Image (spheres, grey):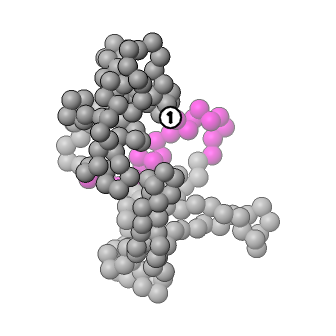
């Protein structure tokens, strides 16, 4: 578990060849240059990296020569040990370790249930239109959510082009009509 992770890379564990059955922490170096790529061209893939784990010249996290300078705040890394996996859902360790919320007014944040097209691959049946990543399908999702007291729907991958999310919206989806 990680908390207070801001402007700092996530940590992952790899096998430690010097210690049988051991692990060691790995951090991604900071990406200086990226290109669009990866699965279905949905990722920014680093082509050049800095030999640091955080953004250069952006205190407090940049550490020249690997040595911290001045007052710095680092993220928490924790391992939770429980007797039953159900205890993980009710654990508040993340909230205890995280810094105070930086959002002054959180009253607009409303948790809720969601209809997510990915779970059924936009595969609606018994409708009088071609189901898919299109306006009629999402109207059906909106109606379904309303009928079943689901607070939200997710319009997932496929609503926009590959090069620019906001400037290359799929011609099959009318966002203004849906919103």
Q: Is residue 107 magenta?
A: no
Callout 1: SS: loop
Badge 1 density bin: few <14, some 14–19, many ≥20, Cα 10 Å: few
- Quarter of the rendering containing residue 88: top right
Quick one: 120 or 126, which is closer to the camera?
Answer: 126
Count of marks overlaid on the render:
1
Along the horizontal axis of the image, is 178 left or right of 148? left
Depicted 93 relative to depicted 177: above or below? below
Q: Is residue 11 visible?
A: yes
* Residue at the spot of label 1: 90
Q: Residue at x 35, y 48 (%)?
A: 161
Range of magenta residues: 81-102
Q: Position of residue 67 (x, y in %)?
A: 46, 83
Along the horizontal axis of the image, is 108 left or right of 4? left
Depicted 86 relative to depicted 58: above or below? above
- Quarter of the rendering containing residue 69: bottom left
Q: Position of residue 116 (x, y in %)?
A: 43, 30
Q: Position of residue 25 (x, y in %)?
A: 60, 66
Q: Is residue 96 magenta?
A: yes
Q: Is residue 142 visible?
A: no
Depicted 19 relative to depicted 171: above or below? below
């Amino acid at each position: 578990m990680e908390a207070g992770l801001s402007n700092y890379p996530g940590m992952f564990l790899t096998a430690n060849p010097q210690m049988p059955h051991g692990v060691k922490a790995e951090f991604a170096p900071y990406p200086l240059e990226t290109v669009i790529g990866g699965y279905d061209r949905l990722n920014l893939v680093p082509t050049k990296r800095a030999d640091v784990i955080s953004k250069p010249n952006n205190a407090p996290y940049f550490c020249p020569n690997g040595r911290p300078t001045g007052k710095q705040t680092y993220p928490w890394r924790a391992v939770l040990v429980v007797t039953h996996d159900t205890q993980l859902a009710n654990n508040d360790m993340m909230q205890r370790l995280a810094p105070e919320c930086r959002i002054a007014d959180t009253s607009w944040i409303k948790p809720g249930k969601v209809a997510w097209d990915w779970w059924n691959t936009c595969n609606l049946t018994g409708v009088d239109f071609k189901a898919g990543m299109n306006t009629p399908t999402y109207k059906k999702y909106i109606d379904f959510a309303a009928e079943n007291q689901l607070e939200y729907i997710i319009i997932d991958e496929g609503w926009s082009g590959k090069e620019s999310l906001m400037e290359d919206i799929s011609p099959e989806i009318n966002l203004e009509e849906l919103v």
